[in-house]
Image (cartoon, helix red, strand yellow):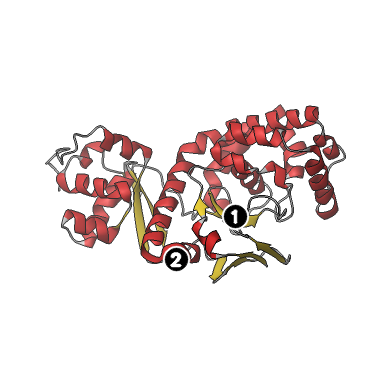
Amino acid sequence: MVRFHFTAEDLARTRVVAAPHSLWEIASSLHRFQTRKGRWAFADWHRTASARLHGTELGRAVRNVLLPLFPRASYFPDFLTPMEGSEGLGHGLKAVLATPPAQVTREITMLSDVAGAPGWAPLLAGHEMRSQLVELLRAYYQAVITPYEERMRECLEAERVRHARSLLDHGVEGLLSSLTPAVRWRHPVLEFDGGGTERDVHLNGRGLLLVPSYFCWDMPVALVDPGLPPVLMYPLLHEPATAHNVVDGRPGPPLAALLGHTRSVILRATATGATTTEAARHAGVSAATATHHTTVLRDTGLITSHRRANTVLHTLTPLGASLLRRGTGRDTVGQNAS
C-alpha cells in the first residue's frame, strides 16, 4: 500500500496538471504494449500505433530500448517522468537530459535489482547515451502519441472540470475522495494498492500534483524517490469508443442539426461543464429531451461526455469551443431545430 500523508498545508497545495503530462503518457502508453488488460479501451490507438511501428527502425528501438526501461507493474526510473513533462514534451525531455548522473545511476541500479535492466542501461548516466534516449522518446511521442493529443486534452479538460465542481461543492477532500475507485481518501491519508509494496510518503507541506493520464489503465502510479516533488498519476475513465456521426449503426445528424435554440443553449452550458440535469434546466426542457440534444452534440464532435457513477458530465471539445468563440455572444446560432 502506498500512502500519502497530508497536512493542512498539503491540502492547500494540491493541484491538477493543466495539460497532459507528456512523459507520463509515454510511460503509460508503453505499458499498453505489455498487457492485454484494458485493450478494448485503447483498441484504435493500439492498432494504429502497432502499424506505425511494425517493421521500422523506430519499432525495433521501442522494443529493444524503451520497453526494457519502462516495465509494466514494476519499478521504472523516476528520472524518465520529470515534473517538467506537464509543461510539454520539450520541457520534459530537457529535464531528462539534465538529470544528475548520480541520480540516473542510482535509479538504473534499482531497475536492475527489481526488474532487470539491459547491459547498456548504466551508460545512460553519460550525456551521449541519454541524448540518444531523449531523441528516441521524442520520435516515439511524435509517431504514436501526437495524433491523439487532441483527444487526450479533451479528456483531461473534462476531468479538470469534474474536479473543479468537486472542489467547489465539497472542498479539497471531496476532490481527493473522487479521483478513481482505486484511490481511497481517509483523512489525512490518500492511499492506493502499490502492488505489494508498503510505502509512506509524508508530503510535509509540498502538496501533491495529480496527473490524470489518458494511457494509464487500472492502477495509479507514484514516484519512488521521496525527495522528488510528490506526484500521483492515475487513470482517466475510458468508455467504449463510438465513431463520430454514427448512432445505432446509422449515419448521425449533420452539423446543420445543431442550428437551433435548444442545442445552442445546451452547448453554451457545457462551456463550464454541465450534467444532463443542469443542461436540461438551462434549456428549459426535460432530462430526456436534453439527453437527445447532448447525443446530437456529442456525435457531431462538439461536446464530450464522461460518466461517473450515476452522473454524466458534458464538456466542450476544441471544435465546440471554436464554434462558440466564433459566435456573437447572443443565442442566434439558429432557430430551426428545438
Q: Position of residue 219 (x, y in %)?
A: 61, 59
Q: Secondary structure at mark 2?
A: helix
Q: Secondary structure at mark 1?
A: loop
Residue type at mark 2: give it. Answer: Gly
Q: Which residue is mark 1?
A: 206
* Quadrant placement of the N terminus: bottom right
Q: Which residue is mark 2?
A: 174
Mark 1 to mark 2: distance in Å? 20 Å
The reply, left or right, for residue 66 in relation to residue 23 is right
Q: Label 2: how many residues lie within 10 Å, few (<14), some (14-19) or many (20+)? A: some
* Residue 329 visible somewhere in the drawing: yes
* Residue 56 visible somewhere in the drawing: no
In this rendering, is residue 138 above or below 295? above
Residue at 74% in and 47% down: 77
Closer to viewer: mark 1 or mark 2: 1
Residue at 81% in and 52% down: 115
Q: Are marks 1 and 2 in contact (CB under 8 Å)?
A: no
Residue at 18% in and 54% down: 283
Q: Position of residue 302 (x, y in %)?
A: 32, 42
Q: Label 1: how many residues lie within 10 Å, few (<14), some (14-19) or many (20+)? A: some
The image quadrant of residue 327 is: top left
The image quadrant of residue 114 is: bottom right
Q: Position of residue 320 (x, y in %)?
A: 31, 39
Residue at 49% in and 55% down: 237
In this rendering, is residue 192 above or below 232? below
The image quadrant of residue 317 is: top left
88 and 308: which one is in front?
A: 88
Q: Position of residue 17 (x, y in %)?
A: 51, 47
Residue type at mark 1: give it. Answer: Arg
